[in-house]
Amino acid sequence: MASNGNGFTTCLWFDGDAEAAADHYLSIFKDGKRGRIGRYNEGGPGTAGDVMVVEFEINGQKFVGLNGGSQFPFTEAISFQIHCADAAEADYYYDRLTGDGGEESACGWVKDKFGVSWQVIPAGAIELISDPDPGRAARATAAMMKMKKLDVERMRQAADEA
């Protein structure tokens, strides 16, 4: 996955578990692939031989996991959106990202076991909260605000209430 000067790569700063995180994401996103692993050398700040960076790609997006230390933890200020084709796909991602130490938040947001935030968005959710009819949009949004995992059918029912 050498750079050709085009595009961008998202760097995720981990506290020593970048390789485990890459393996975790590659187990969830089926079209992913692992790239180069770079190790600290005698001239770097880490212990020589330990993993410094691991490159991986999921859903066509390039990432680098950097074992940088504990000084910069993840926050919800950055999240990755997963636009799902249907409720089954949304359930798949939601369950895998919250499993094994991850946690639910609100409105389809989850935090995985490494602290990275994701938004799991089933098809139709965005359309409902941005409906051209302000009343429908408000009712769908109000329903969504009460949810952890997004349920588009419940949002649609709320939007359709008069």
Image (cartoon, rainbow, N blue to C red):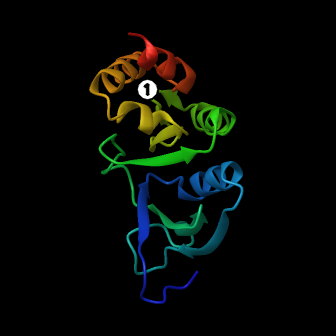
Q: Residue at x 49, y 73 (%)?
A: 40
Residue 64 can be seen in this image: yes
Along the line of sight, the residue nearer the viewer: 148 or 62: 148
Q: Quadrant of the N terminus?
A: bottom right
Give, as a three-letter code, the residue at label 1.
Ser
Say what secondary structure mark 1 lies in: loop
Along the line of sight, the residue nearer the viewer: 25 or 130: 130
Along the line of sight, the residue nearer the viewer: 58 or 159: 159
Q: Residue at x 43, y 26 (%)?
A: 105
Image-based side of 119 in relation to 96, left or right: left
Q: Residue at x 36, y 33 (%)?
A: 131
In the image, residue 85 lies at what x, y percent? 62, 44
| CA neighbours of label 1 inside 10 A, class few (<14), some (14 to 19), many (20+) | some
In the image, residue 125 lies at what x, y percent? 47, 34
Q: Residue furthest bottom?
A: 4
In the image, residue 119 lies at what x, y percent? 46, 40
Q: Which residue is mark 1?
A: 105
Image-based side of 5 in relation to 60, left or right: left
Q: Quadrant of the C terminus?
A: top left
Kindly indicate the quadrant of the structure image that contains residue 153: top right
Residue 112 can be seen in this image: no
Please state the total of marks drawn on the protein image: 1
Q: Residue at x 54, y 74 (%)?
A: 39
Q: Is residue 23 above or below residue 133?
A: below
In the image, residue 129 lies at what x, y percent? 37, 31
